[in-house]
Amino acid sequence: MPCIYALAEWWHSSGRDAARRQGPVTAGALFAAGWSLFIDACLMHGKLSFLHWLGGVLATLSALFLNLVSRHDLAGSADFYGDGGQKRIRAYLLCVYVISFAALAVSVGVLVHDGKDDGNDLWPGIATVLQTTLILASGMVFFNTQNTEADNDGFLM
C-alpha cells in the first residue's frame, strides 16, 4: 500500500507538469497514427476519391484552428455586458467545433457509402473514420495540455 500512496503523492505534486510535458508528444503520436492509417489505406487501394481525403483535411484544419486560441484567453470574466473579446473567441471555437463535427460526419458518410456495396472493401472507410477521430483527439489533447499561466515554459501558446 505505501507504493500506491507514493504514486498518488507524485501525481498530485507533479502530475500536471508531467501532463503538460507529455501532452504535445501524445498529441503528435495520435496525429501521426491517424495519417499513417489513412496512408496505409491509400497504399492498399490505390486512388481514393476526394471525399476520402476530405474528413482528414477538415480534421487537420480543425485541430490547427483550435490550437490558435490560448486557454488563457478563455479564462477571463464572462459577464454579459463586458467587452466582446471572449464572445468572439467562443464564437470562433464554436465554428471550429462545427468544422470538427463536419469532418467526422464526412468520414462516417464515406464509411456508410463504402459499405453499401457488398463487393467493396471497408478498410478505406474505416481508416478514414479512425484518421478523423485520432486527429481530432490529438487537437483536443494538445489544447487541453496547454499552459494557462503567464509563463509558457517554452510552448507556443
Image: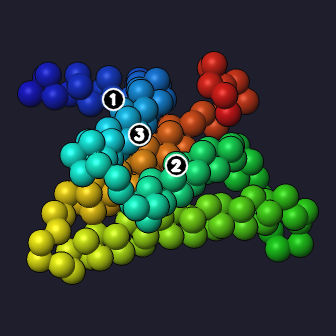
Label 1 secondary element = helix
- Kindly identify which residue carries mark 1: 11
In this rendering, the answer to whether 18 lies above or below 138 is: above
Find the distance from the CA under tag 1 to the CA under tag 3: 26 Å
Q: Is the residue under label 2 in contact with that under label 1 (CB below 8 Å)?
A: no
Q: Earlier in the sequence, mark 1 or mark 3?
A: 1
Q: Earlier in the sequence, mark 1 or mark 2?
A: 1
- Kindly identify which residue carries mark 2: 60
Judge whether residue 71 can be spotted in this image.
no
Residue 41 vs residue 3, the one in the foreground: 41
Q: Residues within 10 Å of mark 3 (few under 14, many from 20)?
A: many
Residue 51 vs residue 10, the one in the foreground: 51
Q: Position of residue 64 (x, y in %)?
A: 60, 45
Judge whether residue 109 can be spotted in this image.
yes
Find the distance from the CA under tag 3 to the CA under tag 2: 9 Å
In this rendering, the answer to whether 1 lies above or below 61 is: above
Q: Is residue 68 toward the left or the right of residue 43 in the image?
A: right
Q: Is residue 111 toward the left or the right of residue 24 in the image?
A: left
Q: Position of residue 65 (x, y in %)?
A: 64, 50
Residue type beneath disc 1: Trp
- Kindly identify which residue carries mark 3: 31
Give the residue at x 38% y 35%.
32
Q: Residues within 10 Å of mark 2 (few under 14, many from 20)?
A: many
Residue type beneath disc 3: Phe
